[in-house]
Amino acid sequence: MAKMWAGRTDGTTEKIADDFNSSIHFDSRMYRQDITGSMIHAAMLAKQGIISETDADTLVDGLEGILKDLDSGALEFDWECEDIHMFVEQVLTQRLGDVGKKLHTARSRNDQVALDVRMYLRDEIDEITALTKTLIAAVTAKAEEYYDAIMPGYTHLQRAQPITFGHHLMAYAMMLLRDVDRLADTRKRMNLSPIGCCALAGTTYETDRRFEAEKLGFDGICLNSLDGVSDRDFCVELMSAIATLMMHLSRFSEEIILWSSWEFKFVELSDAYTTGSSIMPQKKNPDMAELVRGKTGRVYGDLMALLTTLKGLPLAYNKDMQEDKEAVFDACDTVKMCLKVFSGMIETLKANTANMKRAAQKGFINATDLADYLVKKGMPFRSAYKISGQLVALCIQNNTVLEELPLSTYLSYSELFEADLYEHIDLTTCVEKRISEGGTSTASVKAQIAFVREALA
Ligand code: ARG
């Protein structure tokens, strides 16, 4: 097929080379951004007297027509085209004749593709942010539902101290809130316009880059043309933010998988978000959570792929950079899917509060509180820690728990013990006494819920 760039070469290439070179299969999704950018470009060219107002009107009408026809399906992509930019220009020229050929004045595909990707990803960030906020709202609603449900808190996956399920869930709400913040930060640096950088060196035409940037919703322009066309930091940053978000979802998934096992039985996932086994009738598998955990690896791969692609590239544009799109699109598609599934899974999740409580009662998770009790009566912490540990050992030996030991036993370890110790080591007391900001007391959890809701508003 003859190429639009035929000139120095005759533009006839081998089919296999065309297929290899082509990106329309994955960049066609940017047609809206490409056409919008071109309409503003035409307007700028006319405003600057580079083309006539009549030509600009013809170009804008033509572009509008292409957009409408692609939206409605009346116009189909030509998969033989090299990329979306070539496709739009080709259709425009078919429809308008020579006027269509004026559009590409004072620009290059290098600044055009950089523009399109920024515009496309800007919208993706808005969508990912909205989905993340929906998930935060779902997690926060669950936390409110279980704000006082006592469960064991873990370190080293060993029962450590009593917390509430609400407190545990709010930890994820905080992580996801940081993700929203990271996305906003990424968007800020992404939202500068590269259009007008042209191939690499700028242009001899008297263009108005700031006019184009403003009309296209950018906060400013890339200030070095070489950088403008070869910068893909915004893709790396976005993928890094998404990778971090996926890491959070993956940790959450891991816990949901553990909690829904027979060994824990802390939560029950809705049938709508589980699958059965083809052979074992008793199975109810947390496939959604497992897939989110699995897809996290895939998104890390996308990030590494682009970092690796970019690491040896000299300035300015190199064709290697065409590889940016599949990676960053995949990361966006994947995280959006994961967020949607996750929200539904959380909304329909039920906690087995009785099992959580039972698990909390068995692990001596009030041993710290027993030591604190002695400290408050005047004993140095290290000594109190030792006595508390000895009492735990005694319980294990006798297959009992701290709550069941008689006061006489306690007194044989320290005369500071009094009958009020039982109230002190009661799990509800242990939770409610942790009043420090960010702690597990119900008042603190409610404050965290209020903070997150405020941040979302
Ligand atoms: N399809 C190309 C890409 O995605 C567009 C830019 C092509 N520029 C060039 N000089 N070949 O990177």
Image (cartoon, helix red, strand yellow):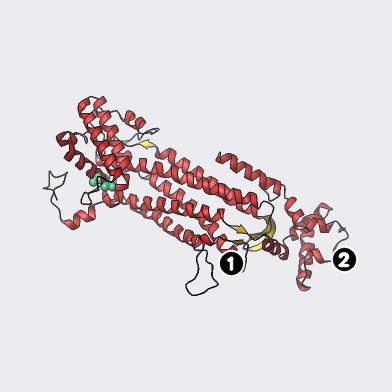
- Residue 432 location (% of width, % of height): 74, 51
Which residue ends up furthest to the bottom in the rendered image? 279
How packed mark 1 is, by other alpha carbons closer than 10 Å (few <14, some 14-19, many 20 or more), is some
Name the residue: 61% across, 61% down.
267
- Residue 132 location (% of width, % of height): 50, 47
Secondary structure, mark 2, is helix
Q: Which residue is mark 2?
A: 412
Q: Is residue 55 left or right of residue 442?
A: left
Q: Amino acid at mark 1?
A: Ser
Rendered image: mark on residue 261: 1
Q: Is residue 444 above or below residue 358?
A: above
2 or 1: mark nearer the eye: 1
- Residue 33 location (% of width, % of height): 32, 40
Say which quarter of the image contains residue 111: top left
Name the residue: 70% across, 58% down.
161
Q: Can residue 316 be spotted in the picture?
A: no
